[in-house]
Each structure stands twice: as structure tokens, then as C-alpha cells.
């Protein structure tokens, strides 16, 4: 396999299980593309693959960074490239697996970033602006100068909104302009990109609800409480799976109410993920039916990969 396999899709779609099976078939190793799985702790909240789920397949870019430390898309692209080179140098197939579309597209599109200009005073000013006027007002500020980037960001993703504003503030050009210039240099790699999708939205919703229930059984409350009690971890504190449980810790809502909110927010997040991946026409959609077993999904993926690799 000369090409890099990319497995994307919404949360709870079964990306990890598929990536592991493909790694067995194509002599591969997995590189995570998940903006929360990079952090130490938060094992349950970020749905890190357990040793049992990894089945002996090496996984890279998982659990290597303290949640108090910052990490940019540029950092991810650099580290992902290092992993790909290492894996390929050993005659193996690199399999990128995750649901953070910004990470995946930035690597696939070979985007180059200029992170040399930083203005911490400006960041603090924008943070205070969001606290005073709300996240939606901050996103609107970005939309006025860079509607293309604003369209890709949720209002709760304050860190990325501020970074986009900071790029314009320090360089005079927007992130979308920088991306357009960067895309002039194609990637040195070839990719087969597979997105897991569903023939019935209810199928995905049921999978999400079951996953949340399983996460609660395996220690989600402990993960969320750690984030709640350590305010110096702002990125981790915003993770879906943690912040929805904070009202329970504050005694404002029952656990049942918070769990229902978590399931709702996760379903909404999955919808945004699917919207992101569906608009990239390079993605080969692998449709999962309600009764599909893992073996069925693997067979569909292998058929897509083999037919695409022959082109």
C-alpha cells in the first residue's frame, strides 16, 4: 500500500475499530487525528482507544500532551508528517484515523502555517471580549473579516476563533487567504480517504447514546471532575463529555439531566462532523446500515481501498 489511508467520520461511528482491522490487513500503524485524544488524562472523555481496542497495533499522537499546554493545527501537521515518514520508512502503511476535520484537511492539503507571530495581549483582549459579549459575538467579529473560516468554526471553539482573529491582527491576511496560498504546493503523499456515514440518522444517534452510557460505566464522571477541578486546563474544560456534567458537580442539575444534555450535544457535534466531511468530494463515503457488523464494514472499506488504489 503506497497511499496513506484516512478513516474519518462522526463520533461513535466505529472509526477506531475499522482502522485497527485495516492495519491488520495492510500492515499498518494508526495515527490519531483527534484534538482531544492528544492530551494525557481524559481517557474516557476523549474515547481514547484502550489497549484491548488497539489489539497490538501501534497508535501514534495519543495521550502525549498535558491538557494545560497549547497545541495548534500547525503542531499537528508537523507531528503527523513525522509519524508518516517514520511509518513508511519501516515499510508499513500509515492510517490516519479521527474526527477532527481541521487536522485531517490541513495535513492532506499540505497547508503551511506561520505561527511565528503571536500577540498574547491581543488573545487576552479577545478572551475578555467573549466573556463580556458572548462567544457568538466573538464569532461574528471573525465573520466580518474572514467569513470562510468563520463558517467552519462553532461559537464554542473560542481558542480557534481567537487564533483566526490573531492571524489577521498580526499579519494583515486571513487564515483562509493563507490556506489558499499554501495549497499551491501539493502534498508529497497520495491519500485514500474514507468517511463513515449512515443510511439512517437514527442508527448513528443510537450508537452515540449507547457510547455515552458505556463511558459513564467506565469512569467518565472521574474524567469530567478532574477537568472541573483544574481550571488551568481551558481546552480540556471545553471538551464534549466534560462541560455538560459541570452543572451536576455544582448541584444545579441532576445527573440524568446532564447525561441527556451530553447525548444531545454529542449528536449535534456528530452532525457538524458529517457536514464537514461530506462537502469534501475526495472522501469516499462508506455507508453503514443498521444491521451491519464490523466484518461487513471492513469488507466495504477494503473494496473501496482496493478499487481506489488500482486507479
Image (spheres, rainbow, N blue to C red):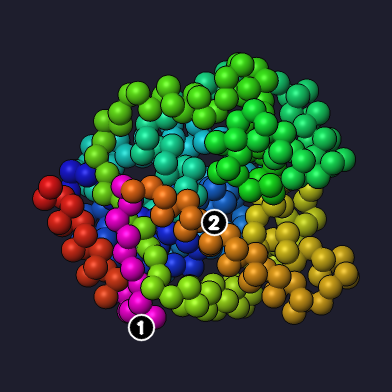
Q: Residue 83 colored magenta?
A: no
Q: Residue 294 colored magenta?
A: yes
Give 183 or 15, whichever is nearer the viewer: 183
Q: Comparing marks 1 and 2, which lies closer to the viewer?
A: 2
At label 1, counting other C-alpha atoms closer than 10 Å, the crowd grade (few under 14, some 14-19, many 20 or more) is few
Residue 22 badge = none
Q: Determine whether the residue tagged by mark 2 lies in a helix, strand or loop.
A: helix
Which residue corresponds to the image point at 64% horizontal and 28% vertical from the top-left? 145
Distance of mark 1 from mark 2, alpha carbons? 24 Å
Residue 291 badge = 1
| Magenta part of the chain | 282-295
* Residue farthest bottom in this picture: 291
Tell me where residue 167 appears, x and y as whole percent.
62, 24
Tell me where residue 154 appears, x and y as whole percent.
63, 48
Q: Is residue 149 visible?
A: yes
Give 187 or 47, whichever is nearer the viewer: 187
Q: Does label 1 or label 2 sit earlier along the sequence?
A: 2
Name above or below for residue 76 compared with residue 226: above
Name above or below for residue 238 compared with residue 178: below
Give 116 or 280, whichever is nearer the viewer: 280
Q: Is residue 50 visible?
A: no
Which residue corresponds to the image point at 57% horizontal and 25% vertical from the top-left? 174
Q: Determine whether the residue tagged by mark 1 lies in a helix, strand or loop.
A: loop
* Residue farthest left in this picture: 310
At label 2, counting other C-alpha atoms closer than 10 Å, the crowd grade (few under 14, some 14-19, many 20 or more) is some
Which residue corresponds to the image point at 69% horizontal and 49% vertical from the top-left? 156
Name above or below for residue 136 compared with residue 45: above
Q: Which residue is mark 2?
A: 272
Tell me where residue 93 appears, x and y as whole percent.
24, 48
Amino acid at each position: 500500500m503506497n497511499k496513506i489511508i484516512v478513516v474519518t467520520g462522526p463520533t461513535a461511528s466505529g472509526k477506531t475499530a475499522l482502522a485497527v482491522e485495516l492495519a491488520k490487513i495492510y500492515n499498518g500503524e494508526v495515527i490519531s487525528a483527534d484534538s482531544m485524544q492528544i492530551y494525557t488524562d481524559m481517557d474516557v472523555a476523549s474515547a481514547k482507544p484502550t489497549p484491548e481496542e488497539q489489539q497490538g497495533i501501534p497508535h501514534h499522537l495519543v495521550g502525549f500532551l498535558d491538557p494545560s499546554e497549547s497545541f495548534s493545527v500547525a503542531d499537528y501537521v508537523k507531528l503527523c508528517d513525522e509519524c508518516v515518514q517514520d511509518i513508511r520508512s519501516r515499510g508499513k502503511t500509515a492510517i490516519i484515523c479521527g474526527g477532527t476535520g481541521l487536522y485531517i484537511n490541513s495535513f492532506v492539503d499540505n497547508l503551511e502555517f506561520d505561527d511565528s507571530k503571536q500577540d498574547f495581549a491581543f488573545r487576552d483582549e479577545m478572551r475578555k471580549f467573549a466573556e463580556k459579549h458572548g462567544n457568538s459575538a466573538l464569532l461574528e467579529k471573525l465573520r466580518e473579516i474572514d467569513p470562510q473560516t468563520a463558517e467552519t468554526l462553532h461559537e464554542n471553539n473560542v481558542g480557534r476563533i481567537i487564533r483566526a482573529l490573531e492571524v489577521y491582527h498580526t499579519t494583515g491576511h486571513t487564515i483562509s487567504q493563507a490556506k489558499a496560498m499554501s495549497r499551491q504546493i501539493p502534498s508529497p503523499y497520495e491519500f485514500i480517504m474514507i468517511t463513515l456515514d449512515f443510511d439512517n440518522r437514527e442508527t448513528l444517534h443510537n450508537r452515540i447514546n449507547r457510547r455515552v452510557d458505556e463511558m459513564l460505566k467506565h469512569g467518565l464522571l472521574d474524567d469530567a471532575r478532574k477537568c472541573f477541578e483544574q481550571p488551568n486546563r481551558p481546552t480540556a474544560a471545553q471538551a464534549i463529555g466534560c462541560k455538560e456534567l459541570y452543572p451536576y458537580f455544582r448541584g444545579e442539575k441532576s445527573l440524568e439531566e446532564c447525561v441527556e444534555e451530553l447525548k444531545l450535544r454529542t449528536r449535534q457535534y456528530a452532525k457538524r462532523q458529517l457536514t464537514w466531511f461530506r462537502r469534501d468530494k475526495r472522501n469516499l463515503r462508506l455507508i453503514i446500515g443498521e444491521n451491519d457488523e464490523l466484518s461487513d464494514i471492513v469488507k466495504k472499506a477494503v473494496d473501496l481501498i482496493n478499487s481506489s488504489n488500482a486507479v
